[in-house]
Image (tube, helix red, strand yellow):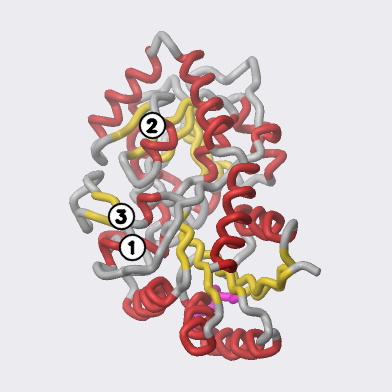
Amino acid sequence: MKRKILYFHNGKSTFVEKDIEILKTQFEVIEFYFDVRNKKGIFTQFIKQIFFIFKHFKVKLFVTQFGGYHSFFPSLFKVLFYKIHVLVLSGTDCVAFPSISYGNFYKKYLRWFTKFSITKASYLLPVSKELIYSSYTYQNMDFSCQGVLCHIKKCTTPYKVIYYGYNYNKWYSSPNKEKNSFVTIAADLSTRFGIYLKGIDLILDIAPFYPNCSFYIVGGKTIKNQQNISNNVYLVDKMNPQQLSEFLSNKQFYFQLSMSEGFPNALCEAMLSSCVPIVSNVSSMPFIIEDSGFVLMKKDINELKTIMDNALTCSNFELLQKKARSRIEQNFPLEKRKEMLIQTIKDIISD
C-alpha cells in the first residue's frame, strides 16, 4: 500500500501538475486546493483546510507547493502534532519588490504567514539556490539581496535545491525560423505589477528602434493602454502547450527580462525550442542559460540595445541554438527532478 501525502497548492499550474504526477508514482496523493483569488475568502479557506487536515489526521506527511497563506496550517500542524511538512519554494514566496508592490515579503500579512511557514517547516525544497539567497544588482529601486536568508536572517530550516525538469521530447525547433523574431511569454499583465515584473516595459520601449524585427508577447492580450504600442509588437493570446510548442519552434530569440524569477519554465521550454535566450541578470537565469545566450546586467535601455545589436549580428547563431537546447536537455530533464524529489522525500521520512 502506498504511503499517503496531503498535498496543498493554491492553483494547478503546469509545475504543480508535474509534481503531483511524480508523487503519485510512489505515494497516494490527497490534494487540497486553497483558493486565494478572493482575499475576503481567505478565512473560509482556512476553515476548510483545518477540516481537511483533521479528516486525514492519520496522514503524517504534508507537501505544500509555494509559501503563503495555504502553507501556514501545514507548518502549524508540524509544530503541534509532529507532522512532516515539506515546503516547495518557487519564487514570489522568497522576495520583496516594493517598487512594484510584488512578493510575499512585501505584503505585511502575507509576509508573516510566509515567514512562519518557512521557519517552522520540516524541510524546504527551493527550485533554485538563488531562492535561498542571492545578491541583487539588476536595478537599484529595491533590496540589494533577495531570497529566504535576505528576508529571514536567522532561518535555519534545512533545504535542498531540486531544479524543475522538462520533457525535452515535447519541444522542437523548426528549420525555417522567422528571421529577426523575438518572443516572450507572460501572465497577469493586467495587474499593477505585471508589465514591469516580466520586463514587458523594456520590450515595448526597445521595439520602435528595430522596425525590421518582430516582437511577440504571448499572453499580451491583457495589456492595458495598447494604443501606443509599436506596430511591430504582436500581442498574442495565451496558448495551450501544443500550440505553444509549435509557436516557439519557429522563433529565433526568447526574452526573459524579468525583475524577479524563480526557475522560469517558459525560458527553459523556449531554449528546448532552440530559441537563443536574452535574459536579465536576475536569480537563476544567468546560470540556466550559461553561454548559450545574452545577459542584460542592468535594467537599461541602452545596454539592451547593445545586446540586441550583438544578437542580430552574431556569427555563431546556430551554435547558440544548439547550446540552448542542449543546456536544458542535459541538465534539467524531467526524470532528474522525479528521481531527486522522490528520493529526498523518502530520506526525510526515514529521518
Give the x, y percent position of residue 79: 46, 84
Q: Residue at x 62, y 59 (%)?
A: 16
Identify whether 315 is placed above or below 157.
above
Mark 3 and mark 1: Cα distance apart in space? 6 Å
User: In percent of the image, x 33 and y 26: which residue is there?
Assistant: 209
Q: Nearer the viewer, residue 334 or 67?
A: 334
- Residue receiving disc 1: 148
Q: In the image, what residue type sits under mark 1? A: Val
Q: Secondary structure at mark 2?
A: helix
Residue 133's label in the rendered image is 3
User: Image quadrant of residue 102?
Assistant: bottom left
Q: Earlier in the sequence, mark 1 or mark 2?
A: 1
How busy is the neighbourhood of tag 1: few (under 14 within 10 Å), some, or many (20 plus)? many
Tell me which numbered mark, 3 or 1, is placed earlier along the sequence: 3
Magenta part of the protein: which range?
A: 34-39
User: Would you say the residues marked 3 and 1 are in contact, meaning their CB atoms lie under 8 Å apart?
Assistant: yes
Q: Is residue 126 magenta?
A: no
Dominant SS of magenta comes to loop
- Looking at the rendered structure, the kind of residue marked 3 is Tyr
**Residue linked to disc 2:** 207
Task: Say few, some or many: other residues with alpha carbon within 10 Å of mark 3 (under 14 / 14 to 19 / 20 or more).
Answer: some
